Structure formats: C-alpha cells, structure tokens
Image (cartoon, helix red, strand yellow):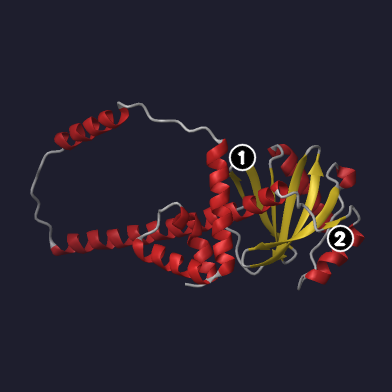
Amino acid sequence: MDCNETRRWLAAHLDGELDLVHDTEVGAHLQTCAACAEAARQQSALRELVRGKLPSFAPPPHLATRIRAQLREERAAVPSRSFWWPAWSIAGALAGLCLAALVGYQWGDHHARTAQFSDEVVSSHLRAMMTDHLTDVVSSDRHTVKPWLSGKLDFSPPVADLTADGFPLLGARLERFGGQTAAALVYQRHKHFVTLLIWPAKTELPFAEAQHLGYTICAWRQGGMNFVAVSDIADKEMDDFIARLKMAID
C-alpha cells in the first residue's frame, strides 16, 4: 500500500472502521513511512482535542431495551414462508447483490477520501493557529509573498490582495498537503483567519463545500490550480471572500 492509498484510508483506520485486510496494510505502512505516521499522529491529536472540548452525551439506559423489543416485534410480524426460486431468479438476486456491493464499496471509498481530505484541511488550519505559525513570510504585499512562494515551490501560485475588500493578506507558509507541498495563503476577517491552500490541479477534489468540526471548507479548480479555503467565519462572509478572490485571480 502506497502513501496515497494509506492517506485515503487513514481516517477510517483511526476510527476502527476498516476491515482486517485494509487495517493491517495501513498499519504496516505506518510502521515504515515517517510522513504518513506523522499525518496519523496529527489526526489522532486533532481527534483528542475535539473529544476533550466537545460535550459527550450518554444514551438513556432504557434505549437499548426498547430497540431490542422493537426488533423482536418486527421479526415476529414477518410470516415464515418457504419459496422455490428458479435459476433466473437466483441469478438476478446475485447480480443485485454484486451491484449493491459495488455501490457500497464506491460509497465507502468516497466517504473515506472525503473524511481524510476534510481532516487534513482542518488539521493544517488548526495546527498553524495552535502553534502560532500562521505564516513563514509575513507581508501584505503580494509582490513580496508571490516571489517567496515561487522560490520555494515547483509552481507559481496566484496571490491576491483583498485588503480593500475587507480580507487583508497576512502572509503565507508552506503546507504539506495531498501528497505534495502546497502554498498556504493566510487572510484575516476581523478576529478570524482564512487559510487558502493552492496546488496544481493534478487530482480531483472530493467535494465543493463541506462542514467539518465547525469549520467551513470550500474547494474549487481555477486556472489549472486546486483551491481550498477553510475558516470559521460565517457562511455569507466565506461566499463573499471566494467570490472576490475568484475575480481577483481570474
């Protein structure tokens, strides 16, 4: 199992949701790959942070008893019958099962990729804030930030100055994301921050918009680049930020 496959299944591995084969393969890869092991450590730390800050609720003690009783009633209501199925019916049923298994696998794979992608985006944003390392280069001047990023990366990301629109540029940093190094521009909105990740559009984005751990994530492709914005600002402000950004870099 390579790094891309491991990152795709990492969230499910940490949640204990993988089958034995995939779980063993992910665990074996983490033993030999320092980068993936670090990604697993970061995701685990984020989960612990969330568990420690969010309240937990215990189900009422009678809930399990009520569910079991209802299941027994439903089973008792179904009459027991014997059927003789012709061969064509059995073949149709098998085909249906195969189709259902395929759809289930595709849904599970997409769910795992979406969860991993969301975790990586929010983790990079939170990690930068918690370690007080939002920027490697501090400047509101795009003519300073863009050359700095271009000198560190194998691509030249667009840099927009949105100070006049109420989203001043604070600077940028480098971020390991999606199996490669991405540019991370940092904008401010009042007392909140917006991290904008940019990297060449070599892979498909798993979604256009999502909510994860109280943060809004918006993703799109423009000018041969993938863009992902993450912040806890209001949805209306995020829409305004993205609309102004798209016009500025078009």
Relative placement, left or right, of 246 versus 141 is left
Please tell me whether residue 50 is drawn above or below residue 90 in the rendered image: above
Q: Could you tell me if the residues under marks 1 and 2 are in contact, i.e. CB atoms within 8 Å? A: no
User: What residue do we see at 64% from left, 69% from top?
Assistant: 202
Which residue matches tag 2?
Answer: 145
Q: Quadrant of the C terminus?
A: bottom right
Amino acid carrying mark 2 in the image:
Val
- Sooner in the amino-acid sequence: mark 1 or mark 2: 2
User: What residue do we see at 79% from left, 70% from top?
Assistant: 152
Residue 104 vs residue 94, the one in the foreground: 104
Instruction: For mark 1, give the secondary structure.
Output: loop
Residue 163, how many percent across, how many down? 88, 46
Residue 23, how many percent across, how many down? 40, 62
Residue 42, how many percent across, how many down? 59, 55
Q: Which mark is residue 214?
A: 1
Residue 148 vs residue 34, the one in the foreground: 34
Q: Residues within 10 Å of mark 1 (few under 14, many from 20)?
A: few
Q: Residues within 10 Å of mark 2 (few under 14, many from 20)?
A: many
